[in-house]
Amino acid sequence: MRAPLNELPAVVTCFGFGKAYQGAMAEMLATAREHHPAWSVVAGRSTAPDATFAVEGAADGHLWRPPVPFELDGSFNDWRRITRLKGWWLAEVWRRCPLPGDSGRRRILWIDADARCRSPIAFEVDPAAEVIAGPWFTDPDHDGRYATITTGMLMLQGAKSGATAQVLGRWSAQCLRQIEDLPVEPLPWRDGDQELLTRVLEETADDGTGPELVKLPHADYCYGRDKTSKAPTLFHGRRPKRIPKDPRLA
C-alpha cells in the first residue's frame, strides 16, 4: 500500500562544503524540519581542503572523509568535483543510518543546500519497495536529446543490501573514480553527479536489476530553476558563490 513520503520515517541529509554553503544548508534544514518534524537529520560541514566532514546526527562516526585524494584548483572543475562527493556521501549515510527501529531498511532524502521546503514532501511510495525518486528533466534545447534524473532532491529507499543499495554503490564508485580522474566535460554544460546516476539507472533498467524509478515533476521540486509550477514543493534559490581553492575562505 502506498503512502505519502511525509508520513513515513526518513533521514534527510545534506552537506555544506565551505562556509557559504554551510549557511545555506542551515536555512534549508530549518525548512525541512518545519514541514517534517519527525524526520532525522544527518548533516556534514567541511572547510577542510581534503573534504573531511564534521557530521551531525550520525551515531556511527563524527568525521567522514572520502577514500580518495580530493584537491581543488580554483577552476570551474571544482564544482564538478564537489558534486561528485554526493554519491559517496549518500552511500555513507545509507551504510551508517538505518530507519529507527528497523536496522535492515533505509529511506534517505537528500536536499540541496540552496533548496527551501515550501510544503511537505508528500509524493507517494510503497514503503516496502526498492525505490529511487527524483525530479526528471528533459532539456528543451539540443533537440530534446538529453533527459536525466536531477539530484537537487533525491529519495532512496530499500533494504540495506537491496536493489537501491546496488545502484547507490555503483554510483558512488563512479563518482569517486571521477574525483580522482575528472574527465573532459562530455556535454555542453558542466556535468555532475546526476549524469552518472542516470547512466547507472539506465544500465540496471536494461538488465532488470534496478529499483523502481519515480520520475517526479521537475517544476514542482526544482522551482527557481524551473518556474512553471504554480504550487512548488521545493524552491531552489541562487547558489552561493563559486568555491575558492581554499574552502576556509568561502
Image (spheres, rainbow, N blue to C red):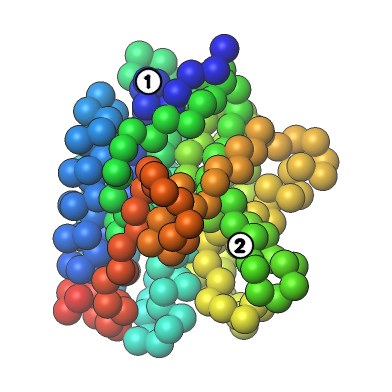
Q: CA distance from mark 2 to mark 1?
A: 30 Å
Q: Residue 32 sits in which quadrant?
A: top left
Residue found at the very far right of the displayed protein: 207
Location of the N terminus by quadrant is top right
Q: Percent position (x, y) of residue 228?
A: 48, 57
Q: Residue at x 37, y 79 (%)?
A: 72
Q: Percent position (x, y) of residue 59?
A: 25, 32
Label 1 secondary element: helix
Disc number for residue 7: 1
The residue singled out by tag 2 in the image is 195
Q: Residue at x 29, y 43 (%)?
A: 118
Image vertical order of residue 20 relative to residue 132, above or below: below
Q: Residue at x 33, y 33 (%)?
A: 120
Residue 220 in sight: yes
Q: Residue 210 sits in which quadrant?
A: top right
> Looking at the picture, which amino acid does disc 2 mark?
Glu
- Left or right of residue 248: residue 146: right
> Looking at the picture, which amino acid does disc 1 mark?
Glu
Image vertical order of residue 227 relative to residue 74, above or below: above
Image vertical order of residue 92 relative to residue 130, above or below: below
Numbered disc total: 2
Q: Nearer the viewer, residue 207 or 141?
A: 141
Label 2: how many Cα within 10 Å (few below 14, some 14–19, many 20+)? some
